[in-house]
Amino acid sequence: MLAVVFMMSGLVSSVWADQTSVIKPVKQVYMVLWRGVTEAERGFMDSMMNRPEPVEFVIRNAGKSRQQVALIRQDILQRKPDLVYSFGTTVTSILAGAESATHSDDEYIRSIPLVFNIVADPKGAGLVSDYQAPGRNVTGTSHLVPMATQVAAMQELDGIEKVAVIFNAKEKNSLLQVEALQSACDAAGIDLVRFPLPNADEAKADDYFAAFARFITSEGADITYLPSDSFLISNAKTLVNVSHGAGVPVYSATEGPIRKAGAYMGLVSRYYNVGQFAAYKAHQLLFEGRQVSEVPVETLKRFSFIVNMDSAKALDRYPPVTIMQTAEVVKD
């Protein structure tokens, strides 16, 4: 198996061909990222390249810019790849538009198969209305553990009566997660207090998190919920520092902040595994003759408890045996 990799103008392409057999037509997968290559993309590409069929990747990073995603969309419409991979709710929404909206193929990607990855709530975001049989050119994977399951995981800890959530009030993805968290907390008899950010302004991040520290102290929060939000994940270290500094452990909906930013714990879907699952769906569309309507939108069936032991020691708060028996323990 031969790999040819080159880079030009922020675009990376990898062509794989089996030189021991007849060369097959190369399928082009155009990958649109929001904040660079994550473990989700590594899982996706590793899985695709471990198969015998030849694939070419075109990788574009939007750098957290909606305007850049829109420009990339125009390039996709002109290039007409065999399949589009999109990371996250924001990117997918800009590329494909809402299922219910009426748009032409010249405005949004409507005819090229699109596989999304790391989308918290595909139905809530308006991307698809039927998980089992998507009614358009879009399918993919969700990484978010069901919210009721996450709340039940938090309740394994002693003394969890009030949860504080910080979220980006202008991101639909964040709003959907907060509403789901509210419903799950109500059902579990737990109070939820909300701290909305006015916008995702990197220059004001320190001020936001300082204000959040004062908020959780005044509210008497028992735990902080860190949702799957790109701005918050990018600033997770600061958020963890202020919350843990106030003695309030951080529960993360995603694995990155636990491994890399010292968040206390979380019940998560591993990005790498979700990427592999998205690759499975892409392979069905590219090489098995499946139609998008035949490839359901799904999440993983098995989740992972991850506990940051350095943070547990610093907080002097160790998870109970019920968690530690199955948890993966990491250190900063």
Image: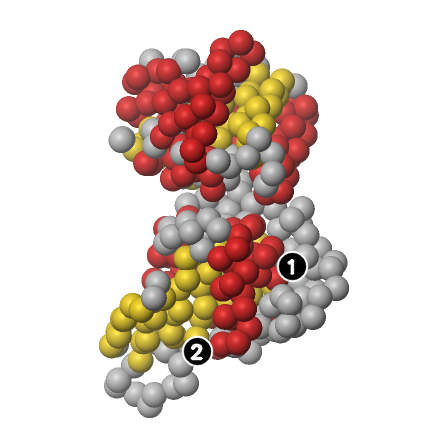
Lateral position of residue 205 relative to residue 198, left or right = left
How many C-alpha atoms fall within 10 Å of the one at disc 2: few (<14), some, or many (≥20)?
some
Amino acid residing under circle 1: Gly
- How far apart in space, not on screen, are marks 1 and 2 (Cα)? 24 Å
Q: Are marks 1 and 2 in contact (CB under 8 Å)?
A: no
How many C-alpha atoms fall within 10 Å of the one at disc 1: few (<14), some, or many (≥20)?
many
Q: Secondary structure at mark 2?
A: strand
Q: Is residue 226 visible?
A: yes
- Identity of the residue furthest to the front in this view: 203
Depicted 53 relative to depicted 303: above or below: below
Q: How is the image coloured?
A: secondary structure
Picture quarter with the C terminus: top left
The residue to which callout 2 is attached is 27
Q: Residue at x 44, y 30 (%)?
A: 205
Between 74 and 133, the one lying in front of the other is 74
User: In the figure, residue 305 lies in which quadrant?
Assistant: top left
Depicted 201 relative to depicted 131: above or below: above
Count of numbered tags: 2
Q: Residue at x 71, y 66 (%)?
A: 103
Which of discs 1 and 2 lies nearer the camera? The answer is 1
Q: Earlier in the sequence, mark 1 or mark 2?
A: 2
Between 119 and 107, the one lying in front of the other is 107
Q: Residue at x 57, y 24 (%)?
A: 195
Q: Residue at x 55, y 26 (%)?
A: 165
Q: Is residue 323 visible?
A: no
Q: Secondary structure at mark 1?
A: loop
Lateral position of residue 170 relative to residue 27, left or right = right
Residue 44 rendering spot, x and y as whole percentages: 40, 60
Picture quarter with the N terminus: bottom left
The residue to which callout 1 is attached is 97
Depicted 65 relative to depicted 292: above or below: above
Residue 151 rendering spot, x and y as whole percentages: 56, 28
